[in-house]
Image (cartoon, rainbow, N blue to C red):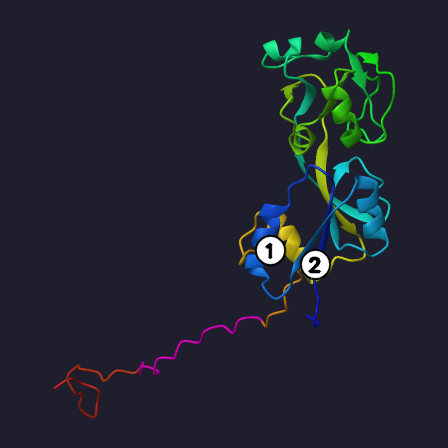
Amino acid sequence: MTDGETFRLAYAPGVTPAKWARVWSERQPDVPITLVMAPTPEVLALLREGGADAGFVRLPVDRDGLNVIPLYIETTVVVVPKDHVVTAADEVTLADLADEEIFHPLDDALEWTEPPGLPAFTRPDTTAETIPLVASGAGLVLVPQSLARLYHRRDLTYRPVTDAPQSQIGLAWLADATTDLMEDFIGVVRGRTVNSHRGRTPAATAPAEKSRKPKKPAQKTAARRTSPPRNRRGRRR
């Protein structure tokens, strides 16, 4: 490790890297971790330009030159005003939203083959800009649950949408930058213990020398005869 070395971790909005950062700090007290939140396209730009060592992104992404480990899938929810009729149910389907005006922001984290409901009057640039429009009653928006929590407001709530596409979070880093520190962070994310194998190439070890047992002293095979002595002619006395 060089003086001033840090591990730089970028992450998309909604991802909460605090638990991994805490474990990292416990295991690598001499290597501070720097956290940078950025939209997924900017996370990828940071990785490719050397501004981050690793990043949590929303999949799918362009994997050219990257290593990516898919981690977990998020529940999709619809964000609505607290007095909306949707709140009467614990969960809804896309069919329940067919007559609702739905915002589809340009940074939508969900992969739609066809956007649900009726198109709202505008397409905001970001999800963050969409939330106040939902609060005003102009329409609804479907997002990963983590984003609904991130942009929480007292006048809004949300309900799971059981048949909507889902967002998946993955860990990404440059394929040619799999350093020892990167291996360490992969171990943290995968929940490996500090003493577990982290994928590094183990040092070659010399073959164990076979234990040698001390040889027993050779036993005499010729035993003295105990038969009666013979006379010169070979007859027994």
Image position, residue 154 (x, y; %) = 62, 25
Residue 116 visible in this rendered orientation of the protein:
no
Image position, residue 179 (x, y; %) = 73, 60
Residue 60 visible in this rendered orientation of the protein:
yes
Residue 151 versus residue 48 in the image, above or below: above
Instruction: Report which residue position mark 1 lands on.
Output: 24
Residue 90 versus residue 224 in the image, above or below: above
Instruction: Report which residue position mark 2 lands on.
Output: 7
Are the residues flagged by discs 2 and 1 in contact, CB closer than 8 Å? yes
Does the magenta stretch mainly form a helix, a strand or a loop? loop
Residue 43 lies in magenta, yes or no? no
For the point 30% across and 83% down, the residue is: 222
Q: Quadrant of the N terminus?
A: bottom right
Instruction: Provide the residue span drawn in magenta.
Output: 207-221
Tell me which amino acid carries mark 2.
Phe
Tell me which amino acid carries mark 1.
Trp
For the point 53% across and 53% down, the residue is: 193
Horizontally, residue 164 falls left or right of residue 213, namely right
Question: Label 2, label 1: how many angstroms apart (C-alpha)?
Answer: 10 Å
Q: Nearer the viewer, residue 231 or 42?
A: 42
Residue 216 lies in magenta, yes or no? yes
Q: Nearer the viewer, residue 66 or 11?
A: 11
Residue 140 picture quarter: top right
Residue 15 picture quarter: top right
